[in-house]
Each structure stands twice: as structure tokens, then as C-alpha cells.
Amino acid sequence: RKEVEQDPGPFNVPEGATVAFNCTYSNSASQSFFWYRQDCRKEPKLLMSVYSSGNEDGRFTAQLNRASQYISLLIRDSKLSDSATYLCVVNRVDSNYQLIWGAGTKLIIKP
Amino acid sequence: GAVVSQHPSWVICKSGTSVKIECRSLDFQATTMFWYRQFPKQSLMLMATSNEGSKATYEQGVEKDKFLINHASLTLSTLTVTSAHPEDSSFYICSATPVGAQETQYFGPGTRLLVL
């Protein structure tokens, strides 16, 4: 089983739709969780950290369910510029500073 | 702030040559720098963790004699791919964590390596 698993994608959705990404992680002792965005042939960029209480940033909402070891990202009112690969990232338990990356889910927003 | 640069941004070389990639934190001092590799349509894979002034810690399966890492200062780490072969062609990305903010990683723009 992979340490971090994401929907394989790609997701093809019309502009304005709501998109949900799911991610599960295998190590229950993981402490830090993130969503990154990666554009084609570019480095990943931090989209948002994920907190136990859930957090929202504009059109983006992230949630964490520790009991289910599940992380989600919701994008409302999607824009063409949201097209990218979304990466679920979890810290490595034996080192707080090393990150374990999901394979990513590609999102394609169509006009 | 928190800008990380990589040089070169892309390189094409012949099989058997060595390639050096630089990673610099431009406006902060980095306690730790990480080197990742990403093959097409795959996730980032951590290759090694580099701390200034000490030997790098390599992940399982990464040959330390092939991927030489030097972290001589708090703002510069280098990765040298020695005797590169076509299977080493990949996207190499570094990240740096600022002193005092070790849960935060800032990424460089990546270096695309093509070995012919």
C-alpha cells in the first residue's frame, strides 16, 4: 500500500463546477498535511496546510479526518487557471521535516 | 521573500558526463535542503536530505556515489550526477527550509536533465 494515495484522475470539469479531491495516508502517526499545486513542468507550490479543524481560503477548503486517515480538498466555482495537478503531502513520522508525496491528481477545467 | 533558485534550469548532456546542479536560497538561510527527483506522471521522490556542514542522508535506493551532494553554506547546496546515463533523465527539484521554520519547504524551479 502506498503511503499516500490519491484519486488517479484526470478530472475533466466545466468552469464554475465544484471539484473534490480525496487523499488517504497509511501512517496514523503522521502530523502535518498539505495540499500542493503543480503546473506542468514547474515546481510544486504550497496551496494550503490542512488542520484538524478544517480550513478555508477563498474558494478552497481543506479537511482532515484523522480517524479515517483521510484528507480532502474542495474547489468551488472552479476557474480555468485552476487547471493543474494537485498533490497531497504528508510529513514523514520519523522526521518532521521530510515530506511524503502522493502521485497527484490532474485537474482540467474546460470553458 | 523565501526564494529558492536552481541552476541550470535545463541541461542536455552526453551519456557518461557529470552534471552539477546548484540550489540557492536567495533571501534566507537554510538549515536543510532537500533534493527530489520526479519522473513523468509520477510523484516527487525524495533523494536525499542535506544539512549544512554535514554529510547528506540518502534515501534507500539512491546511490550516494552517483549523486554527490555538497552543502557548503547555509545558502547553497549542489547535486552532481556523476557519469549520467539516459535513465537519469528526470526533473530534479530542490527545496530549502529556513532556520527556525523547519516545517516549511520552499521549492526551487527545478532542473530538467536529459541524458542522450
Image (cartoon, rainbow, N blue to C red):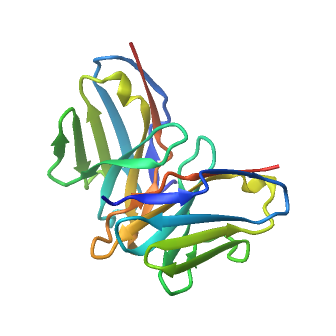
Q: Is residue B80 visible?
A: yes
Q: Is residue B61 visible?
A: no
The residue sitting at the bottom extreme is: B54
Specify whether B111 is left or right of A3: right
Q: Is residue A62 above or below residue B64?
A: above
Specify whether A80 is left or right of A42: left
Name the residue at 53% across, 53% down: B44
Name the residue at 41% across, 64% down: B26
Name the residue at 84% across, 55% down: B14
Q: Is residue B47 above or below residue B109?
A: below
Q: Position of residue A9 (x, y in %)?
A: 48, 31
Q: Position of residue A107 (x, y in %)?
A: 43, 29
> Count of labels shown?
0
- Return the residue nearer the eye: A105 or B90: B90
Q: Is residue A58 above or below residue B113?
A: above
The residue sitting at the left extreme is: A53
* Image quarter hosting the C terminus of chain A: top left
Specify whether B16 is left or right of A86: right
Q: Quadrant of residue A26?
A: bottom left
Q: Position of residue A23 (x, y in %)?
A: 38, 45
Q: Position of residue B48 (x, y in %)?
A: 56, 71
The residue sitting at the front extreme is: B26
